Amino acid sequence: MVRDTSQEEPAIRFQDVNKSFGDHVVLDQLNFTVNKGDRVTLIGPSGSGKTTILRLVMTLEELTGGYIFIDGQPLTHDLRDGRRVELKEKHRNEVRKRIGMVFQQFNLFPNMTVIENIIEAPVHVLKVPKSQAITRARELLDKVGLADKEHAHPLELSGGQQQRVAIARALAMDPEILLLDEVTSALDPEIVGEVLEVLREVARTTDITMLIVTHEMQFARDVSNRVLMFDSGSIVEEASPEVMFTQPTEQRTRDFLAAVLGD
Amino acid sequence: MNSRPLWDWDAAWEVLPLLLEAFITVTLYVTVVSSFIAAVLGLVLAIARRSSPRPISALIGLVSNVIRMTPIVVQLLFAYYIFLDAEPLLIGVIIFGIHYATYMSEVYRAGIDAVPAGQWEAATALSMSRRRTWGAVIVPQALRATVPALGNYVISMFKDTPFLIAITVTEVVRAAQTYGGNHFTYIEAITLTGLIFLLSSYPTSLLIGRLEKRLAYTN
């Protein structure tokens, strides 16, 4: 059954999580927790399963084995009477409302204007009155520096602007957990800064739990309080950003950071 | 016998109102109503096929293929002889609607498949319901890509309407034949019938082209 959500429950808990695509094992018996208010960055070579972790939390992928708990509540599967059972779509949807995600490819709805993109879910999922949703959307657009773009269509905007709208759209749902999946990887280098600045601001001004996959190591250092180094579906090393980026313990981490940071 | 001119203007003026009447009350009527049925039913089929469990979606696919792989005349006659009491025009409207729905559902299917996976994922990330995801995100995007192809099927259906002759419906070609048979002069009636089709199809295809441009996301 659904567990009691007391203060002690972590925001996200992975318990013995397995994920395979066919014969290919992406995550192998993974256990880790993210506490409320944590900003956790996942680093590691591509194919190490970082993005899969975010996609599992967002229920965009099905678990092969194990459990994920969000604030103590099972997300897609639960252990009942010693058996692993799949939970109903309705339950997933309830838990999912606490989670927001920003994608590498923005994924704004091109058939809606900027403001329609932002108010869509608050109005139709959370049933917020439309006028209230619009007021909130304008505040968020102001926060991401796009107050003048509310009636623009996404494809009229630059990549950086689209991604800032996508951040506003995710925040409009007031998520407790925000997943950031390589949010600057599709952007031109000179635009990356404006998006990261917005996210730094979000990190400073809210207590949203964040799970971040990024190749921007300086951003990871600035925003996160924990860094997890992944390789081949397992955690190689865990440390604070200061330690991880200056004196990592594992050779695998040192090799990876040397390759990513260049020189 | 040689005195008959190849083209008789009197006959042409006499037959034109008859042709136009049959054209409007049958040909256009069937095209408009059946297009509507085909467009709606086609979309329903495409969505059902994508969101149903595998056996049901396979069944829909099989039935669609059977309908598409047999001539519409056979289907018209089949329905005509099964439902002998039914109004032939009604049978025509329904068969044309169903037949073209199977073509249009393929068009919709391609349009739906062309919507990037990221759109579904964004909808999931926003906890949108399946219904809302289809209605507000997927279908509007799929439709933009499908309008030209759907329009071409409407024109194609329009030109197929003379098959209604097989089930005794007097559409415009049948009206021309009847006039020709009664007055021993076919050329005027058949030529005018061809002109009526041409003059209706061509502007429609131009309209579809303009609609296609207007539906583009950016100006």
Image (cartoon, coloured by chain):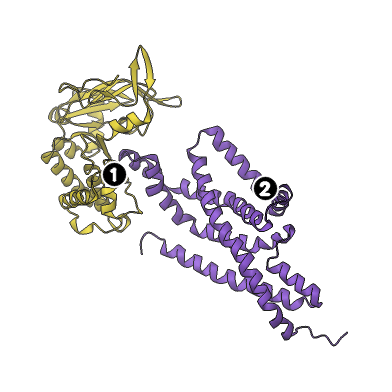
Q: What's the residue at 56%, 59% (across, down)?
A: B33
x and y, in percent, of residue B178 in the image: 76, 70
Q: Nearer the viewer, mark 1 or mark 2?
A: 1
Q: Is residue A216 left or right of residue B190?
A: left
Quadrant in the rendering for residue B96:
bottom right
Q: How many marks?
A: 2
* Local SS, label 1: helix
Indicate the quadrant containing the N terminus of chain A: top left, top right, bottom left or bottom right. top left
Of residue A263 and residue B78, the one placed in the foreground of this image is B78
What colour has chain B?
purple
Do the residues at discs 1 and 2 belong to one chain? Answer: no
Q: In which image quadrant can residue B25 be found?
A: bottom right
Asked if B78 appears above or below A205 in the picture, the reply is: below
For mark 1, name the chain: A
Residue at mark 2? B69
Looking at this view, is B27 or B137 the one in front? B27
The residues tagged by marks 1 and 2 sit, at their Cα atoms, a distance apart of 43 Å
Chain ID at mark 2? B
Q: Residue at x 62, y 72 (%)?
A: B198
For badge 2, the amino acid type reads Met
Residue drawn 63% across the image and 73% down it: B196
**Residue A234, relative to residue B196: is it above or below?**
above
Please tell me how crowded label 1 is: few (under 14), some (14-19), or many (20+) other residues with Cα within 10 Å.
many
Residue A207, percent from left and from top: 14, 35
Residue B132, numbered label: none
On the question of residue A54 being in view, the answer is no
Q: Determine the colour of chain A.
A: yellow
B22 horizontally vs A26: left or right: right
Q: Which residue does the numbered mark 1 point to in the structure image?
A: A121
Farthest-out residue, left: A205
